[in-house]
Amino acid sequence: MNQLAVKPQRRRLKTGRLFATPAALDALRAVNVSVGDLLSRHLCGDWGDLSAEDRAQNDLALEAGLRVLSCYALPGNGKVWIITEWDRSMTTVLLPEDY
């Protein structure tokens, strides 16, 4: 049996300082989703549940130094956003209603 080697994903952006709203942390805990896993996806360019247009906008934002937004669906119909600011000074994990 052959095993496929899985390449680790390469980081595409820097986080800066990390922040999370209490509501986002509570929501992630409630559904047993790791904030670290979502941050890793975000930093590697897995933008989650975005339209093709929004994904393309994020890809352009990486090159142009603009804000980057990822959206991840949570079990039970919730969503969490991760936003890295244009200057890469900070990344925030939040619920859409926290914005």
Image (cartoon, rainbow, N blue to C red):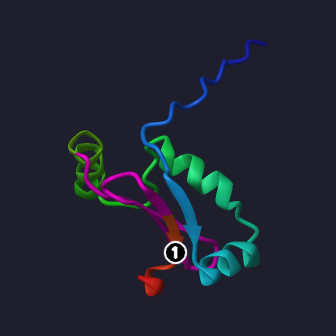
Q: Residue 56 vs residue 32: left or right?
A: left
Q: Quadrant of residue 70?
A: bottom left
In percent of width and height, residue 97 lies at 45, 87
With respect to residue 81, does 56 lie above or below?
Answer: above
Q: Quadrant of residue 3?
A: top right
Segment tinted magenta in the rendering: 65-91
* Badge 1 amino acid: Leu
Front position in the image: 16 or 97: 16
**Is 85 contained in the magenta span?**
yes
SS under mark 1: strand
Picture residue at 43% right of the left edge, 43% below the top: 45
Tell how many labels: 1
With respect to residue 99, does 9 lie above or below?
Answer: above
Front position in the image: 2 or 91: 91
Picture residue at 56% right of the left edge, 79% below the top: 77
In percent of width and height, residue 69 lies at 37, 61
With respect to residue 69, does 15 lie above or below?
Answer: above
Extreme-top residue of the structure: 2
Front position in the image: 52 or 11: 11
In percent of width and height, residue 66 lies at 25, 53
Picture residue at 28% right of the left edge, 44% below the top: 59
Q: Residue 19 vs residue 84: left or right?
A: right
**Is 68 contained in the magenta span?**
yes
Q: Residue beneath label 1, please?
A: 94
Picture residue at 49% right of the left edge, 52% below the top: 16
With respect to residue 20, does 49 lie above or below?
Answer: above
Q: Quadrant of the N terminus?
A: top right
In percent of width and height, residue 99 lies at 41, 82
Q: Residues within 10 Å of mark 1 (few under 14, many from 20)?
A: many
Q: Residue 6 vs residue 90: left or right?
A: right
